[in-house]
Each structure stands twice: as C-alpha cells, then as structure tokens.
Amino acid sequence: MSKGDMKDVIKTQINGELEMEKLLAEAQKPVMDAFTACSICEGFCGGETATHEERVEAWQFLINTGQVWTLQGWYGRTAEHLIEQGICTPRTQ
C-alpha cells in the first residue's frame, strides 16, 4: 500500500469517527416535550446548564405546539417578547 493510499485510509477512518461523535452527541440530546421545554425555560432539572440555542429551541417548541399560551402568564408574556425581538417566530398553521 502506498503512502497516498494509507493517508486516504486514515482520513476515511478519522472522518468516520468524527461522524460517529456527532451522531452520539445528537442521540444524547433530550427529546423535547413540554416538561423538558419548561425546565429549560425556567432553569431547573438540567435546564440551568442549557445553552442559548437550547433555550431558544425550548421556547420555540412551546410556541409551535401552542402550549405556551396555556401555561402561567409569564410564559405567554415572555414568548410575545421573544417573538417581538425576532428571537422566536410565531406559530405557523
């Protein structure tokens, strides 16, 4: 096997390992449901370590499902503010 072939084999192996790491990270991400979204929004049960992107995703989930409007008033007011600021988008029908 030539050096060029060996480099290609190593690159393929490394790329496969990187892809596997991405898949594992995605698989470990919690499935979004109302409880998970609320815990992220309020910062409890692991929500306190959520990233900005995860917080936005949680709010958008609650908006998209319509659940945000059935929760305590703080949720609805905060959702309206996030929509006005362009951070989240209104629910699409």
Image (cartoon, rainbow, N blue to C red):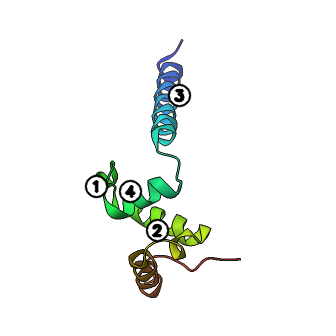
x 50%, y 42%: residue:
26
x 33%, y 49%: residue:
45
Which of marks 4 and 1 precedes in the sequence? Answer: 4
Q: Which residue is mark 2?
A: 59
Q: Give the x, y percent position of residue 57.
A: 47, 63
Q: Compared with residue 6, is residue 64 higher up or lower down, i.e. above or below?
A: below
The numbered disc on residue 48 is 1
Quick one: label 3, few (<14), some, or many (20+) residues within 10 Å? few
Quick one: label 2, few (<14), some, or many (20+) residues within 10 Å? many
Q: Identify residue type, mark 2.
A: Trp
- As drawn, the residue found furthest toward the right would be 93
The one of 45 and 61 positioned closer to us in this rendering: 45
Which of marks 3 and 2 precedes in the sequence? Answer: 3
In which image quadrant can residue 74 be found? bottom left
Quick one: label 1, few (<14), some, or many (20+) residues within 10 Å? few
The local secondary structure at tag 3 comes to helix
The N terminus appears in which quarter of the rendering?
A: top right
The numbered disc on residue 39 is 4
For the residues labelled 1 and 4, say whether their Cβ atoms are less than 8 Å apart: no
Of circles 3 and 1, which is in front?
Answer: 1
Could you give the CA–CA distance between mark 2 and mark 4, rounded to whole angstroms? Answer: 11 Å
Q: Which residue is mark 3?
A: 12
x 43%, y 67%: residue:
56
Q: Identify residue type, mark 3.
A: Thr
Could you give the CA–CA distance between mark 3 and mark 1, rounded to whole angstroms? Answer: 38 Å
Of circles 1 and 4, which is in front?
Answer: 4
Total marks drawn? 4
Q: Give the x, y percent position of residue 8.
A: 52, 26
The local secondary structure at tag 1 comes to helix
The local secondary structure at tag 2 comes to helix
Which of marks 4 and 3 precedes in the sequence? Answer: 3
